[in-house]
Amino acid sequence: MAFKATVLTLYPEMFPGHLGSSLSGRALERGLWQIETVQIRDFAEDRHRTVDDTPAGGGAGMVLRPDILAKAIDSVAASGDHRPRFLMSPRGTPLTQEKVRRIAEGEGAVIVCGRFEGVDQRVIEARELEEVSIGDYILSGGEPAALILLDAVVRVLPGVMGNDLSGQHESFETGLLEHPHYTRPQEWEGRSIPAVLTSGNHRAIEKWRHEQALALTQQRRPELLSSEDPYAELLGVKNARKRVEK
Ligand code: SAH
């Protein structure tokens, strides 16, 4: 069965958004994944179709009401629906490639997009929503965050990437940032492609790429490095890591 995403939002017109183009768009057309949206506002009960109210305890902004959101969730996630339920939230667990892979192995996902100041805490608890963040910054709504989560998930679904191998050396998949890439022309503005890459020596190329990935990770994201890497000592990475930890 294809991976099925159900997105609860006040702005269903934002979907599938960019996921309707390119790789994910073709995969959608081919039925490799599905997306449906639910308009949270359809579950409001008053004449003005109100979904939010002022925060208890005072303060700026508005909060999504628990009763209305719960009804929207219950309308899609019937008993027997084992898909995980996510709430996009800057307070959530940061999304990682490992998490993306795990989501992609499942049947799909129910994703709630917050708006305003956020969502009433009680519905997060009562409907067991797992809060997921896409980074340490504040968006105006959960929709772009949901699109990013789905983008990352869809590209690792079986059959979506043209060349299934091309996912495996990427940043984070190996625990490291990826090595630099080059392509023709051989010479460009006085810069040439590193000679090893055109040497035809595949072992030397692998070694060079790995060293580059390590050096780049050490420079930019030292917290990602594991000192177990056989090349780490060679590059003084262990010592660099100790310096960072101090
Ligand atoms: N007052 C909240 C921010 C609300 S932003 C706080 O300080 O934590 C409005 C909505 O945008 C949130 O409910 C959430 O759904 C979404 N959002 C904002 N930033 C996000 C992020 N970094 N990751 C995931 N969702 C985010």
Image: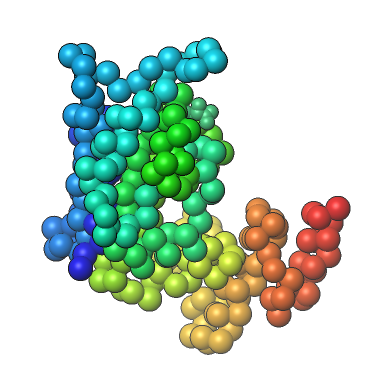
20, 123: nearer the viewer: 123
Q: Residue at x 20, y 55 (%)?
A: 34
Residue 14 seen in this snapshot: no
Residue closer to the observer: 72 or 60: 72
- Vertical order, 117 against 210 (above or below): above
- The residue lying toward the viewer, choosing from 68 and 23, is 68
Q: Position of residue 29 (x, y in %)?
A: 13, 58
Residue shown at 60%/74% (left/top)?
210
Between 165 and 13, the residue placed more toward the observer is: 13
- Determine the image quadrant of residue 219: bottom right
Image quadrant in which you'd find residue 211:
bottom right
Q: Give residue 152's position: percent from left, percent from top.
A: 38, 56
Look at the image and tell me in which quarter the N terminus lies: bottom left
Regarding residue 36, the answer to whether it shows in the image is: yes
Rendering coords of residue 64 (x, y %):
38, 26
Q: Residue at x 45, y 34 (%)?
A: 122
On screen, residue 221 versus residue 142, left or right, reads: right
Left or right: residue 227 versus residue 49 is right
Q: Please tell me how many numbered marks the rendered image carries.
A: 0
Is the image coloured rainbow, by chain, by secondary structure, or in one colour?
A: rainbow
The residue drawn where x is 32% and y is 36% is 70
Up the image or down, 204 lies above or below 126; here it is: below
Asked if residue 207 lies left or right of residue 117, the reply is right
Q: Could you say where residue 99 lies in the image, as x and y percent from the top left?
A: 47, 60
